[in-house]
Amino acid sequence: MQTITDPQFDAYFPLLASKIEKLDEEIDYGKLKNMEKRRKAQTKYFPQFYPEIEKVIPKWAWLNKQQDGRICFHILRMLYCAVNDENYLKLTPTLQNIIKWAVILHDIAKRGVPTFPIEKKDPAHPYTSAIVALDILTALPGLKEVLEKEKVAKLQSRVKAAVVDEVADLSQLGEILGVAKDALASSGFCFVVFKLVLMHQSLPTLKHFKQPMQLNEQEIRKYYDTEFMKLMEIVMVNDSINYQLSKPEYKEQLKAEFKELFAGFYTCLLYTSPSPRDRTRSRMPSSACKKKKKKK
């Protein structure tokens, strides 16, 4: 069997990777209480990263034209928050790499931002973004040689069919993940990134954030395990708090509320779950679960 090396985010986006961690040193959100001033600061700073992003993610140029480029700003702010997240810092390098790819792709096909009316929020964007994410990931060297185009196309068609009246139908999630398990069998990395993008609005969330897609407790136990829940927590929390960088106290309040919310999800996973045969697991890359041996 051919050995697959996961595409390294930092290698594809070297400038972004070298600077995003210290975004707060370039844009002092705490002092930019005015939305227009924040927009101007981001418009001046973020585009330096766009050329290298567009080489790997051509869809980024289209995304930059949506809502005056605000979705691109959101993704890069979220990346900054994620790579500074205490839970992210506890992950193995393999899982950190997965998180960074999931973040930059999670809204890649989104047409609207939360501050716009409900009809412009694009509630199906997790599914449509997952379709585009597959185009991007399967074009990368290493993955395009081992993933079968026909199976990936079948998966994309299955995801597209689950978008009904511009809303993603979660009742079809099990069938989608079954197709994904087969189509992406050669790459645990690709499967987990795809699943994070596809499901990043699938959990019940805080009362502040309304979303049409929500799994019930039984479904959560079916489609999540503890390892995948830890990754989704990083994605979901930072997808929200990045909007509050100019309000540090409120940001910390949200983090506390999310911590309590996810404590409930982890408790939910402790209850009897479907057998491993019936469960659609995350199939983490083997290297992601390796722990260093303690020195005696």
Image: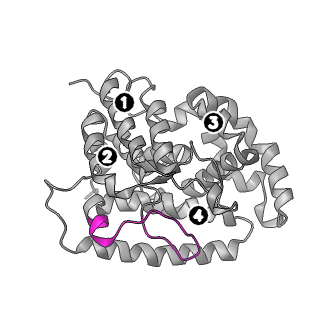
Dot in front, 2 or 4: 2
In this view of the protein, can residue 145 be seen by the observer?
yes
Dot in front, 4 or 1: 1
Q: Residue at x 86, y 57 (%)?
A: 37
What crowding class fits label 1: few (fewer than 14 Cα within 10 Å), some (14-19), or many (20 or more)? Answer: some
Real-space CA distance between mark 3 and mark 1, rounded to the nearest whole angstrom: 21 Å
State whether residue 225 is above or below residue 182: below
Q: Which residue is mark 4?
A: 240
SS at mark 2 in the image: helix
Q: Which mark is residue 189?
A: none
Q: Position of residue 292 (x, y in %)?
A: 30, 52
N-terminal label among 4 and 1? 1
Real-space CA distance between mark 2 and mark 4, rounded to the nearest whole angstrom: 26 Å
What crowding class fits label 4: few (fewer than 14 Cα within 10 Å), some (14-19), or many (20 or more)? Answer: many
Q: Which residue is mark 1?
A: 153
Q: Main secondary structure of the magenta part?
A: loop
Q: Are marks 2 and 1 in contact (CB under 8 Å)?
A: no
Q: Position of residue 209 (x, y in %)?
A: 57, 70
N-terminal label among 2 and 1? 1
State whether residue 196 is above or below residue 145: below
Q: Which mark is residue 60?
A: 3
Query: Residue 205 in magenta?
Result: yes
